Amino acid sequence: MNTPRTDGASVRIGALVPLTRPGWAEAGRHLLAGLELAVSEVNEAGGIDGRPLELVVRDTAADPQRAAAAVDELAGQGVAAVAGEYHSVVARAAAARADALGLPFLCSSAVLDALTEQPTEWVARLSPPQSRGWQLYADFLLGAGHRRIAVAAQPSVYWAAGTRILRDHLAPRGGTLVELDGSALTPKAVCDELVGHRATALLLLVGHPEPAVSIVQSVRGDQRLSEVMIGAPAGQPEFAEWAALLGDDGAAVPFLRYLPERLTPLGARVETALRERLAEAPSFVAFEGYDTVAVLADVLRSHGTERARVAASWPRVAVDGTRGKIQFSRTPGISVWQWASTPIQVVDRDPAAPDRFRVLRSG
């Protein structure tokens, strides 16, 4: 085993992670577990040319201003790059600041198409753009026979973008989308609206755990809506907290996750290590965290730690990750360097065994 030298300064990477409310702290915990596992393995293998890799973690708490301030702080501390973040609106703020400062940012898990206002050389992303995932989700809805679909949405750039993607994809294919105010309507009022609009599916574009949990419980308890499918494209049912709060009511709620049908050999090994570290099954977010560091470590070894050289290396990345070979390219309509072949699945929890996931569609 090659132990990193202790006589040289560490190579530092900033990590943006939502670890406290109102951030999705469970997602943040999984993201951090993947990041930390990969850093420990990099250091066990000799670090970056003999120098230890160090993760400098900052809690964003789902606050865009806090994230932007953290990028400023990390840039001043001399990090070679910034990584992470789960929430799209937060990642957008971090990406804008990183671009302005000339600091490489590898976004792990945020999907908003417009991650930056203008094309940038400084930002790359592992997760797929929202348009690709949510169009697949719309195809799943149509394939399942749903034509009258309601969304309970709260005000957010992310939810608004998702609603627009769904409507634009559904409309020419015979589907209609009804928008319900997820902030103003009570769960009971949401049920009444579903009946009035004769919707066969309700998508939760709202915060977790509330009001998502209360809406699910209300719909599941309304006999008028026994045939209505509940969906959560943003992935709320992926995490154990969902199952703990909702029990059987949380099953059969399709969502998007970014895993392949079969993990790579590396992914299978990492899954075992993550399960031990988390004391539960790792979510796709944990694999995103691991792959983030795998890419950055390869870049830092191959191209050095100078920031401009790190950013210039995005188009030359070819790394075997836990979910496939990672390479970045320019994707039409996307302003950052993008992993174009990120695996996407529509999945739900099996009503017969809510701890088991069923793959409903892949793309």
Image (cartoon, grey):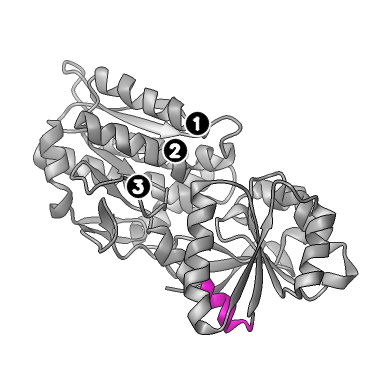
In three-dimensional space, the C-alpha distance between marks 3 and 2, rounded to whole angstroms, equals 10 Å
Residue 154 on the magenta span: no
Determine whether the residue tagged by mark 1 lies in a helix, strand or loop. loop
Secondary structure of the magenta portion, mostly?
Answer: helix
Q: Which residues are magenta?
A: 138-145
Q: Residues within 10 Å of mark 2 (few under 14, many from 20)?
A: many
Pointer 2 residue? 90
User: Hey, what amino acid is under mark 2?
Assistant: Val
Which tag, 3 or 2, sits closer to the chain's start?
Answer: 2
Q: Is residue 39 left or right of residue 276?
A: left
**Residue 155 rendering spot, x and y as whole percentages:** 59, 46
Identify the residue under disc 1.
Answer: 63
Q: Amino acid at mark 1?
A: Asp
Q: CA distance from mark 3 to mark 1?
A: 16 Å
Q: Label 2 near label 3: C-beta < 8 Å?
A: no
What's the residue at 75%, 72% (across, down)? 197
Point out which mark residue 334 bears. none
Q: Secondary structure at mark 2?
A: helix
Name the N-terminal-most of marks 3 and 1. 1
Q: Residues within 10 Å of mark 3 (few under 14, many from 20)?
A: many
Q: Quadrant of the C terminus?
A: bottom left
The residue to which callout 3 is attached is: 115
Determine whether label 1 and label 2 are within 8 Å by CB: yes
Q: Examine the image and state in which quarter residue 195 appears.
A: bottom right
Q: Amino acid at mark 3?
A: Leu
